Image (spheres, rainbow, N blue to C red):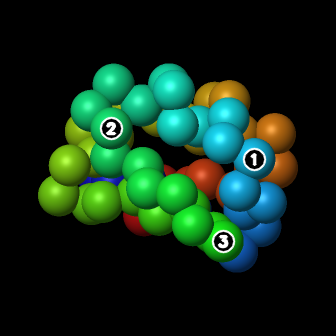
Amino acid sequence: MAYVITDRCIACGTCLPVCPVEAISEGDIYKIDPDTCISCGSCASVCPNDAIEEG
């Protein structure tokens, strides 16, 4: 199941470079493309705000 970014996201950018398939897009709150996400959890493990969860 793809990961999702919750409203706790502060758009710090920490998750962007760790995604191996570039499924994360920038914005006021970042978003993960569920069709591209491979559910590796790399983004969730580096998020300083615990804003990324399994969807």
Residue at 52% from the left image edge and 37% from the top image edge:
16
The alpha-carbon separation of the residues under discs 1 and 3 comes to: 10 Å
| Between discs 2 and 3, the one toward the N terminus | 2
54 or 49, nearer to the observer? 49
Q: Which residue is mark 2?
A: 22
Q: Which residue is mark 3?
A: 28
Location of residue 20 (image quadrant): top left
Residue at 68% from the left image edge and 35% from the top image edge:
14
x, y percentage for residue 40? 37, 31
| Between discs 1 and 2, the one toward the N terminus | 1
Asked if 33 appears above or below 19 in the picture, the reply is below
Mark 2 Cα within 10 Å, few/some/many (few <14, many 20+)? some
Q: In the drawing, does residue 20 fall left or right of residue 27?
A: left
Q: Which residue is mark 1?
A: 12
Q: Secondary structure at mark 1?
A: loop
Which residue, as the protein is rendered here, is positioned at the far left?
Answer: 35
| Between discs 1 and 3, the one toward the N terminus | 1
Asked if 18 appears above or below 32 in the picture, the reply is above
Query: Looking at the figure, which quarter contains the N terminus?
Result: bottom left
Q: Secondary structure at mark 3?
A: loop
**Do callouts 1 and 2 mark residues in contact (Cβ within 8 Å)?**
no
27 or 15, nearer to the observer? 27
x, y percentage for residue 7? 70, 74
x, y percentage for residue 33? 30, 60
